[in-house]
Amino acid sequence: MRSAVILAGGEGRRMGAEKASVMLCGRPLIEHVIERILDAVDEVVVVLRDYEQARRLEGAVSGCRVAIDHACGIGPLAGLQTGMNVARGRYAFATGCDMPFLNSDIIDGLFSVADGHDGAVPILNDIPERLHAVYLARQLEDACRIAIARGERRISAPLAWLDIKFVDAEIFRDVDPELLSFFNVNTPDDLRSAEDIVRKRTAERHSGLP
């Protein structure tokens, strides 16, 4: 069984609004993320910061398992620990709620690379994409718990204790030529760019272009 864990509890300070519920072409951003993941996993776990947020996003996360991050406010490590604890799959794909163009073929490839290791993390432009990666769920959960107990807040901290297989993201260009799977919506400008991409893809589908 394969799981996905989406961290969606952030307040989106750079965006100026909660990113999970920001509208992208008429739909909450998190809906786009969930839709892109479904073909690659058997379950989706969405980690939210409180029950109020869960009520607001009830329609958007319908069909997903919802986990509340009771230690929210200390960064993504607590969210990862919560999500990995809830995940039923041996391996889980971890991501944020701000990546609307995730590619299921890339996710599938990362699961394959992770097999036999504690995780698989792609590197793009020399930067590890730790929230576009696959992890052995229980191993990462334990590592996050230890890191938090030691006062760590960096997402890189628990990974230092794990057997992570790093992979050059360039190998995925055959299934995602522009590597849009790694596109993050962090600011209003990013959101406008994402809207342009969605409109372009919609126009191409309607015109019959590949």
Image (tube, helix red, strand yellow):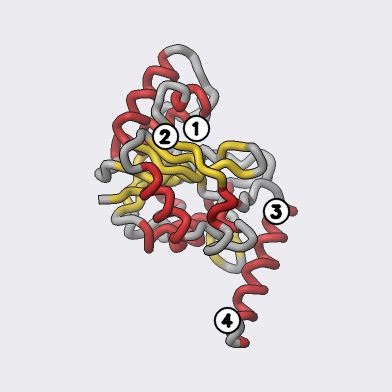
| Label 3 crowd bin: few (<14), some (14–19), many (20+), radius 10 Å | some
Three-letter residue code for mark 2: Leu
Q: Position of residue 156 (x, y in %)?
A: 52, 27
Q: Position of residue 82 (x, y in %)?
A: 36, 33
Q: CA distance from mark 3 to mark 1?
A: 21 Å
Lower position in the chain sequence, tag 3 or tag 1:
1
Lower position in the chain sequence, tag 4 or tag 1:
1
Q: Which residue matches tag 3?
A: 190
Identify which residue, 200 or 125, lies in the foreground. Answer: 125
Circle on res. 92: none
Three-letter residue code for mark 3: Asp
SS at badge 3: helix
Q: Residue 201 falls in which quadrant of the image?
A: bottom right
Lower position in the chain sequence, tag 3 or tag 2:
2
Q: Residue 37 falls in which quadrant of the image?
A: bottom left
Mark 4 vs 2: CB contact within 8 A? no
SS at badge 1: helix
Lower position in the chain sequence, tag 4 or tag 2:
2
Identify the residue at horizontal 39%, vertical 29% (top origin).
163
Mark 1 vs 2: CB contact within 8 A? yes
Identify the residue at horizontal 62%, vertical 37% (top origin).
127
Q: Is residue 5 visible?
A: no
Q: CA distance from mark 1 to mark 2?
A: 6 Å
SS at badge 4: helix
Q: CA distance from mark 4 to mark 1?
A: 36 Å
Q: CA distance from mark 3 to mark 4?
A: 23 Å
Circle on res. 76: 1
Q: Which residue matches tag 2?
A: 80
Lower position in the chain sequence, tag 3 or tag 4:
3
Q: Which residue matches tag 4?
A: 205
